[in-house]
Image (spheres, rainbow, N blue to C red):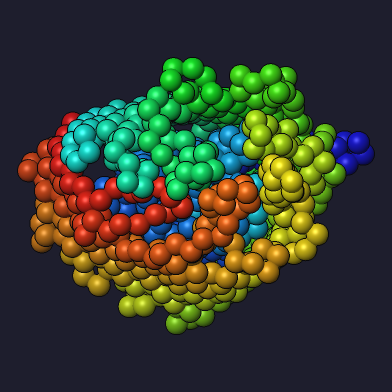
Amino acid sequence: MKTIVSLLALIATTPSLAQSNPTLPTTDEAGNAIVVTGSRSGEATEVRNLPASITLLGPDDLAERQTRIVSDILRDVPGLAVSRTGAVGGMTQVRIRGSEANHVLVLIDGIEVSDPYQGEFDFGTLIADEAAKIEVLRGQQSSLYGSDAIGGVIQYITLTGREAPGLSLRAEGGSFGTFAGGARAAGAGDTVDYALSTSLYRTDGTPTARGGSRDIGSTSIGATAKATWTPSDVFTLTGVGRYSHVDALSNDTQGNPVSPNFGLPIDSPGVKVRNEAFYGLARAQLALADGRWVTAVTGQIADSDRRGFDGGERSFGNEGRRYKGSAETSLRFGSDRVVNRVTAAVDLEREVFRNTTPSPFAFQGRRATTNWGFVGQYELTVDDAFSAGASIRRDENSRFDDVTTWRAQAGYRLPFGLRARGAYGTGVKNPGYFELFGFSDGRYIGNPNLRPEKSRGWEAGADQEIAGGKATVGATYFDSVLEDEIFTTFAPPTFVATPANRTTRSRQHGVEVFGSATPIPQLKFDLAYTYLRARENGVEEVRRPRHVASLNTTVFGTDRRLSGTLTVRYNGRQTDVAFTDPSFRPVTVAMQDYVLVNLAADYRLTERLSLFGRVENLFSERYEEVFGFATPGAGGYAGIRARL
């Protein structure tokens, strides 16, 4: 209690800014790329001066690659591995640097959006808006954000009305009975900035069972409203609301031990999943001392509901709700050459969970967890050469032991454009409700005695600017150790799945390489490669390919009315877990590598009207991301876009 009182007193006497300010633009006035996820101050930091591994995917990147499913473009980020269960709308997981999917904190416009029940965010529910950007911060970030940020942080941000004003409409159709559309209305005045956007992706789908004939289709809807009111130079009020709805068919696995398809997905008429979520945020900011002292309070909510159906009857379900309040204070001081920034923050988070599966054996009462988080952060920039920072966080939890996490990082740029950087940090991940109390008849029993997972790791990297910034190349080595890892046991004779904490350590290490270049205005390259070695208890971790690479090349016409983008994505060999043994024991299986090639083109008929088209999986590669789940072949799509 003394810790709480003393830190609250610190907040009351120090200036503040809100976490992950979702209203800041992608670039500063000089055109330099800036991000907000790497600091709890709420102020923007230049990507080139942040001594951490971060990737910014701007609105042009999403538009040129004609991104409709956000997880697709995340395949182009170093250190990330993406796996989707079959068709669009299926469960989609993203892993950073060999971590588990639930070790990745996901924010949408500053809102923490992971499913409180599942303990992670399903990227299958996130379709792209008409104007958005993505920030991917890699490495242990629990000292800023608390639980879930062991592997890193992914933040998806819709653009403000000032960044992308006007009315835009998009409609397209194509293979597999697919229709997609989007609309956005945005603008800004002297005191008000607003943006309203909505997107739809509907497809009849393709079979996901090996040798099956049942198309697994889905309908995904996303809608966002963001508004900012600035009645004076010192006060700003921001509100964000987002709605997500996914209705997707799915298949069961064959449960008959004598069947040759035992443990594999099979055509299952009448089986589907519905996922619905609402997210909201309100943020008030007061800026004093010419903007150097800024105080903000933020309140947010995430409400998710997942339901499964079989033949029109409920087969499973769960719901979770997160309430979170934050108070941040940040003071910037120094000179033009030396800039210091000190930030303090308090987070209060309450998660409420409930299993709604219609089973007499499942506990359907509500449970809740409350967590206080206290953050301190210091950042330093000297000229355009040296940058450093340190952060520490104390979490006091109603269910688990209290924990302290920290991180330190620094970077230095030499006069000829070479920058060296390094960091060391720790992380924590609290068990989710499903791991603690989940239940599936005859298949899974939760463990209420689980302990939080803990991680520590370091990274060292270098990047070089070439030809006055026309090209940048870089590489980073990372090394992490995970303790008390939660794994699933299958104890005989029933082999019912139950989670437990490991007594041994797991290790992840590897190399990330990136390159980007615009040698001439009509040509643009982006390259990413990751080598990963992730081992759990000495055994290679599943769904973590050792090699992942991507190349994006965009060519523009001399008048920039015509553009074309070639995307090549390589996913190396990996392993997965299969339950094809009639004894119900898990079996490790090897999965082949694959290459996906996409082509996209856009032609501007007038200043307000454009035609576009793309081909996905150009060579109709046959592959699986999750064992047993077939994926679509080649598909073509075309559409029209209007800007008013």
Can the viewer see residue 131 in this picture? no
Residue at the far left in the pictured view: 605
Q: Is residue 53 above or below residue 144?
A: below
Q: Quadrant of the N terminus?
A: top right
In the visual, does 422 lie left or right of 21?
right
Residue 585 locus on image (x, y percent): 63, 51
In terms of depth relative to the viewer, which is nearer, 284 or 129? 129
Residue 102 locus on image (x, y percent): 61, 47
Q: Residue at x 44, y 77 (%)?
A: 464
In terms of depth relative to the viewer, which is nearer, 42 or 335? 42
Q: Residue at x 73, y 37 (%)?
A: 446
Q: Residue at x 82, y 41 (%)?
A: 449
Can the viewer see residue 484 in this picture? yes
Residue 151 locus on image (x, y percent): 60, 56
In the visual, does 539 lie left or right of 532?
right
In the visual, does 169 lie left or right of 456?
left
In terms of depth relative to the viewer, which is nearer, 458 or 438? 438
Count of labels in the image: 0
Residue at the far right in the pictured view: 2
